Amino acid sequence: MKSVLRRGWFWYAAAWIPTAFLYSVVLMQIPNRSLAFGVALAEAFSSVAPVAFLGVAAWWLSGRVSWPPRHIWSFALIHLVAMALFIGLWLAAEVTMIAFGTGLRAAMMITRTFAVFDVFDGVFFYVVIAAVSYAIRIATRLREQDARLARADALRMRAELAALRGQLNPHFLFNTLHTLTALVRRDPDTAEHALERFGDMLRYVLDVKRSAREDVTLGDELEFLRNYLALEQLRFGDRLRVVERIDPDALDCALPSLTMQPLVENAIKYGVAPRAGGGTITIGAACAAEGVVLALDVVDDGPGARPDALDAASGVGLRAVRQRLDTRYPAQSTFSVITAPGQGFAVHLTLPAHTLSAALASSPAAAASTVGA
């Protein structure tokens, strides 16, 4: 990072050298002065140096007043004031340097002869510096966005593969097939219904993977969870109890596919399976903050864990969900875990509330695929 910063400052300083040479040539063409090249070059550098230093302030301001602006008039006003200060300070620096040799009064008189040209030059330099600064910052932001999208895609694929492996691990498959075999003999209708759920669950995972789809509706995600929980209830029976507290207004909201399943799987693994009496898992979803935020909760009444052992208790799946949300919604999502011995395990997360069509329209990946098509 430091080497990149040093290289950037080197090229910034180097960019002013041709400007100083060009300015020295202009000074040599002024009638009745007959300046030697060395003298003209020294004067040119002394005139350009304040602009270069003031340009650093213009660069800094472009980082604080970002593009695109929220309010175009305040954006324009800030830069107009900054431009006036830029030009005023440049003229003041030139007057000061001339005053060392001629005195302040004579310096003021001399400066008047080229002040108008310096004003135009100041406008030109300020606009160029600000424009280049914004161009570099926008290019950097786009590169970072591409990197975030690449990381999000990698995390999505890893989460999907982990979810698929979770459904098809030998223990899960053996127990499900064993239960289905027993059901076929004594309750064929229930067995058939369970097989349909199993197929729907796998189809959901495979369709998401095959289409490289990032977002699904909360309604689709909950339907997948119900199929998953129904199969798990074949194994746990009445030991696995599920309570849903779903706001109907939230069902059309979009979220990254397979976000909820690792949370539920974690609750079954740590909150239900170890206990002879099983446990209850509560799944909640609601639109909060006047419909701007989608709030999701998965809570179990299991044994919980000590706060200092939270990382171990959270498991890999929960860490992957947290990383995925941080990458997909930087500074727009939250992920928190509340637990204590004997007080269960609660996972709360929030993300921006969008419909699926709005999420697809605003997705850079979707926009890129649309352009490519």
Image (cartoon, grey):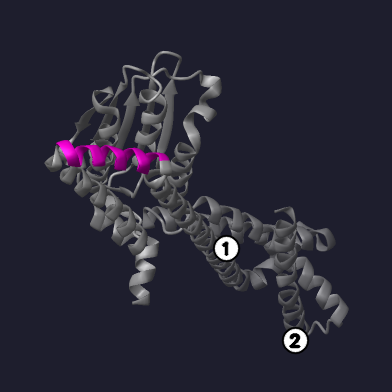
Residue 59 screen position, x and y as percent: 60, 58
In the rendered structure, which disc, 2 or 1, sits on the residue that comes first in sequence?
2
Residue 128 screen position, x and y as percent: 57, 69
Query: Element at badge 2?
Result: loop
Q: Quadrant of residue 29?
A: bottom right
- Is 362 on the left or on the right of 93, as rendered? left
Report the front residue among 108 and 7: 7
Residue interval drawn in magenta: 171-186
Which residue lies under the disc numbered 1?
133
Q: Quadrant of residue 57?
A: bottom right
Q: What is the spatial separation of the Cα atoms under label 2 and label 1, in whole angstroms?
A: 32 Å
Residues tagged 2 and 1 counted as in contact (Cβ below 8 A): no
Observer able to see residue 301: yes
- Residue sticking out furthest to the left: 189
Instruction: Give me the disc on residue 29.
Output: 2
- Residue under the image location 59 percent in, 58 percent down: 58
Q: The C terminus is located in which quarter?
A: bottom left
